[in-house]
Image: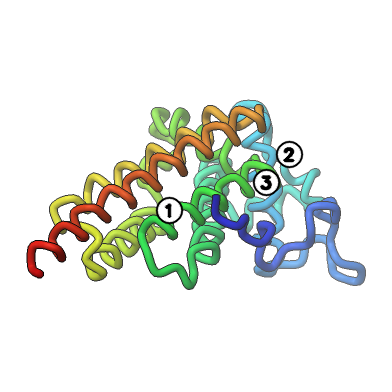
């Protein structure tokens, strides 16, 4: 199995044990990017745990240690904050996937590292996966406006497939199938392995084994082709 990527980092935000507290000396209602990030982080965790209906804007403001007016300055409605928190969660996940696959030179290698990164997220920041799952259910409510998947998802999948096509590992016509497989792998891990680490690791090993089989299936054909040419 691929080496597990470095622990998940949350850019521009204190470590998880920081409790989301503001920095000393900063105004509680300071209007800044830091406040917006804090609200997104708090909303990510709260909506993941309690769902859209299980947490109020007053709860979110209290958890972020800001005034409700500050929350509404950055996000006009609770619906808007929910959608932004969902996009924030997906952005964090795919930034981690990009970091994990950097330097790999094969599709199989990229897939293995991506899956290992997904395991890190589910271990260290499971709220990211849980909110992503909840959003797919809540998007049936038209007022939540999260039906459009964040661009980071499509861009990541497309670029991974295009690299594989450029290396001669995939036919262009197969690209869409690989993109769908990426969805299945990541959603499967998020749903099946969310609460049970043992099940998640077993599922991860099964997927990695499948990916490696795909990689090896191309080797004999290449060897035969070379022999025929000789």
Q: Earlier in the sequence, mark 2 or mark 3?
A: 2
Q: Is residue 22 left or right of residue 185?
A: right
Q: Residue at x 63, y 36 (%)?
A: 48
According to the picture, the residue beneath numbered tag 1 turns out to be 111
**CA distance for labels 2 and 1:** 41 Å
Which residue occupies the foreground of this view, 228 or 170? Answer: 228
Q: Is residue 76 visible?
A: no
Q: Give coordinates of residue 12: x percent, y percent.
A: 69, 68
The reply to whether callout 1 and callout 3 are in contact (CB within 8 Å) is no
Q: Give coordinates of residue 10: x percent, y percent.
A: 67, 60
Q: Residue at x 53, y 39 (%)?
A: 204
23 up-or-down from 70: above or below: below
According to the picture, the residue beneath numbered tag 2 turns out to be 58
Camera-near label (2 vs 3) is 3
Q: Residues within 10 Å of mark 3 (few under 14, many from 20)?
A: many
Which residue occupies the foreground of this view, 18 or 6? Answer: 6
Q: Earlier in the sequence, mark 1 or mark 3?
A: 1
Camera-near label (1 vs 3) is 1
Under circle 2, the secondary element is helix
56 up-or-down from 31: above or below: above
Q: Residues within 10 Å of mark 2 (few under 14, many from 20)?
A: some
Q: Which mark is residue 125?
A: 3
Total labels drawn: 3
Q: Earlier in the sequence, mark 2 or mark 1?
A: 2
185 up-or-down from 95: above or below: above
Q: Is residue 199 left or right of residue 135?
A: right
Q: Give coordinates of residue 128: x percent, y percent.
A: 60, 44
**CA distance for labels 2 and 3:** 24 Å
């Amino acid at each position: 199995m691929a080496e597990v990527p470095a622990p998940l980092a949350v850019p521009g935000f204190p470590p998880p044990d920081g409790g989301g507290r503001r920095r000393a000396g900063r105004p509680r209602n300071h209007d800044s990017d830091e406040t917006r990030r804090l609200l997104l982080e708090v909303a990510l965790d709260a909506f993941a745990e309690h769902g859209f209906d299980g947490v109020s804007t007053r709860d979110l403001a209290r958890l972020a240690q800001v005034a409700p007016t500050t929350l509404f300055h950055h996000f006009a409605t609770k619906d808007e904050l929910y959608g932004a928190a969902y996009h924030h969660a997906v952005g964090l996940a795919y930034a981690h996937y990009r970091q994990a696959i950097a330097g790999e030179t094969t599709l199989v290698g990229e897939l293995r590292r991506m899956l290992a990164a997904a395991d890190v997220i589910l271990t260290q920041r499971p709220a990211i996966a849980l909110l992503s799952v909840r959003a797919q259910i809540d998007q049936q409510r038209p007022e939540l406006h999260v039906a459009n998947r964040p661009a980071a998802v499509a861009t990541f999948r497309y670029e991974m497939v295009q690299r594989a096509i450029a290396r001669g590992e995939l036919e262009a016509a197969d690209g869409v199938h690989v993109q769908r497989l990426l969805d299945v792998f990541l959603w499967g891990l998020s749903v099946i392995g969310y609460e049970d680490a043992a099940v998640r690791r077993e599922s991860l090993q099964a997927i990695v084994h499948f990916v490696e089989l795909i990689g090896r299936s191309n080797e004999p054909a290449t060897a035969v082709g070379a022999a025929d040419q000789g």
